[in-house]
């Protein structure tokens, strides 16, 4: 198994999208990329923790490639909006790839460059590509939120 971590706005929809990908064994919502240890939802939303709402994906590379996960990531959000996805505004909603090794970082950079050259975007991608840091799992009521609420599809 391998891990990948992505931030693409509200983590509920991101989690739901990755759970549908064959080869993804698990996806958990949480917080990463900031400076506050053990953050909770209210702190991430209403104070300056530096964290993004993110999803840590556990996947089987023999079934799904990291590049395929990057394709899903680009397709489920607008990577051209700084610190915003739809109605959600704030640094915690930024677009980011948190690479677990240099191979993931290189793949993310190449994927971002291909996307920008494809002509699909009207503006440059502002997606941050940074090393993965501690992933703080969100409170249990956030895990599989759409499933718990009976929401099919999500917000992405």
Image: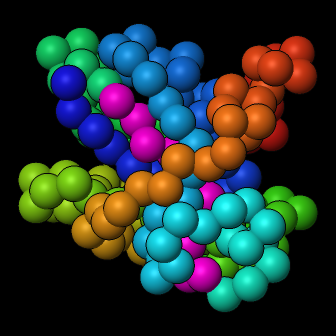
Can you say whether 24 is above or below 57 in the image? above
For the view shown, which residue lies furthest in the bottom direction? Answer: 48
Residue 76 lies, in percent from the top left, at 62, 42
Magenta residues: mostly which secondary structure? strand
Name the foreground residue: 100 vs 155: 100
Can you say whether 59 is above or below 46 in the image? above
Residue 57: in magenta span = yes
Can you say whether 42 is above or below 24 in the image? below
Q: Quadrant of the N terminus?
A: top left
Instruction: Work out whether residue 79 can be spotted.
Output: no
Q: Could you tell whether 153 is left or right of 150 in the image?
A: left
**Total numbered labels placed on residues in the image:** 0
User: Which residue is at a point 26% across and 58% down the rendered structure image?
Assistant: 99
Name the quadrant containing residue 45: bottom right
User: Which residue is at a point 21% across and 33% down the rendered structure image?
Assistant: 2
User: Which residue is at a point 32% across and 66% down the rendered structure image?
Assistant: 133
Instruction: Work out whether residue 36 can be spotted.
Output: yes
Q: Could you tell whether 108 is left or right of 84 in the image?
A: left
Name the quadrant containing residue 16: top right
Residue 156 lies, in percent from the top left, at 73, 40
Name the quadrant containing residue 118: bottom left
Can you say whether 83 is above or below 85 in the image? below
Residue 38 lies, in percent from the top left, at 53, 65
Name the foreground residue: 147 vs 93: 147
User: Which residue is at a point 60% across and 67% down the rendered structure image?
Assistant: 39
The span picked out in magenta is 49-58
């Amino acid at each position: 198994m391998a891990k990948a971590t992505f931030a693409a706005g509200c983590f509920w929809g991101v989690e739901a999208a990755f759970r549908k990908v064959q080869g993804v064994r698990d996806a958990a919502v949480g917080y990463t990329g900031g400076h506050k240890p053990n953050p909770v939802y209210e702190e991430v939303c209403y104070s300056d923790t530096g964290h993004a709402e993110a999803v840590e994906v556990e996947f089987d590379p023999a079934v799904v490639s990291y590049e395929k996960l990057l394709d899903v990531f680009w397709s489920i959000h607008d990577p051209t909006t700084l610190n915003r996805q739809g109605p959600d505004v704030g640094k915690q909603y930024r677009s980011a790839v948190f690479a677990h090794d240099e191979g993931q970082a290189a793949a993310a950079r190449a994927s971002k460059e291909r996307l920008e050259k494809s002509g699909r975007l009207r503006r440059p991608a502002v997606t941050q590509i940074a090393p993965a840091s501690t992933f703080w799992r969100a409170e249990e009521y956030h895990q599989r939120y759409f499933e718990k609420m009976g929401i099919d599809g999500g917000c992405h």
